[in-house]
Image: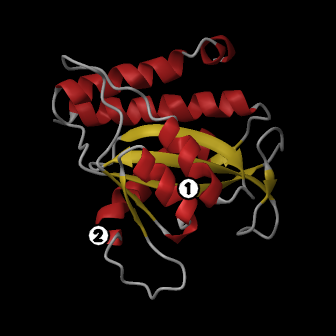
Amino acid sequence: MVEWTEAGVWQRLHEVLLAELHAANRIDWSRAAIDSSQVRALKRGHFTGPSPVDRSKTGSKHHLVVDGAGHPLTVAVSAANTHDTGTLGEMVDALPRVAGKPGRPRWRPAVLLADRGYDSQANRNTLHRWGIVPLIARRGQPHGSGLGTLRWVVERTLSWLHQYRRLRTRWDRRADLHQGFLNLACALICHRRLRSF
């Protein structure tokens, strides 16, 4: 696992499966959604910190961007006390250039959906610069924006990721190994989705 993670095999496998999904017209580029989820980190290590939702116990956070159908496009790990607002630009910039069809690889969705944790003018400006329409719930506004009817796909994919015991709780001190397991899980989800069509 260590050698293949260091060689980037899992990330490359994920990108190959995304290309197959794109070639089969299964990736919904009309929108994407971003969210994050906390997990405990029992052995501490890099990218861990006190969890604000788990009585300051040491944890990590999984950040995920999915397409409109819920296929994982990119995933990352950070410390549990990392605020979502500052991660949106990095996550969108990390979206892979997905091949699979003639012409330039595709990477930008038309719209990005996000909850209040990503609400900032800087994030909106960043998305506008990339030609992506931001649909981000605003802080201080009552619930019921309607975005949840479209954003649920990212929460479902996060739950799929956490069905893997290795990801439900972080066991690895090395962040690169944990990231490798995240990439492998995304590849497995894409493979399962590809076979289901």
Looking at the picture, tell me which residue is in the foreground, 41 or 102: 102
| Image quadrant assignment for residue 114 | bottom left
| Image quadrant assignment for residue 90 | top right
On the image, the x and y values in percent for residue 82 come to 71, 55
Q: Distance between the residues labelled 1 and 2?
A: 17 Å
Q: Name the residue under label 1.
A: 36
Is 152 situated left or right of 91 in this image?
A: left
| Image quadrant assignment for residue 108 | top left
| Residue under the image location 75 percent in, 58 percent down | 81
Instruction: Tell me the tag on residue 151.
Output: none
Looking at the picture, tell me which residue is in the foreground, 143 or 164: 143
Q: Is residue 2 visible?
A: yes
Image quadrant occupied by the N terminus: top right
N-term-proximal mark, 1 vs 2: 1
On the image, the x and y values in percent for residue 180 come to 60, 27
Q: What residue type is labelled 2?
A: Thr
Whether 25 is drawn above or below 17: the answer is below
Q: Do the residues labelled 1 and 2 touch (CB within 8 Å)?
A: no
Secondary element under disc 1, as helix, strand or loop, is: strand
Q: Name the residue under label 2.
A: 149
Q: Which amino acid does label 1 sit on?
A: Ser
Whether 44 is drawn above or below 118: the answer is above
On the image, the x and y values in percent for residue 41 come to 76, 48
Looking at the picture, tell me which residue is in the foreground, 5 or 84: 84
On the image, the x and y values in percent for residue 127 come to 44, 51
Image quadrant occupied by the C terminus: top left
Whether 42 is drawn above or below 95: the answer is below
Is 18 situated left or right of 142 in this image?
A: left
Q: Can residue 162 be seen in this view?
A: no
Secondary element under disc 2, as helix, strand or loop, is: helix
Task: Check the image and name the residue furthest to the bottom.
Answer: 142
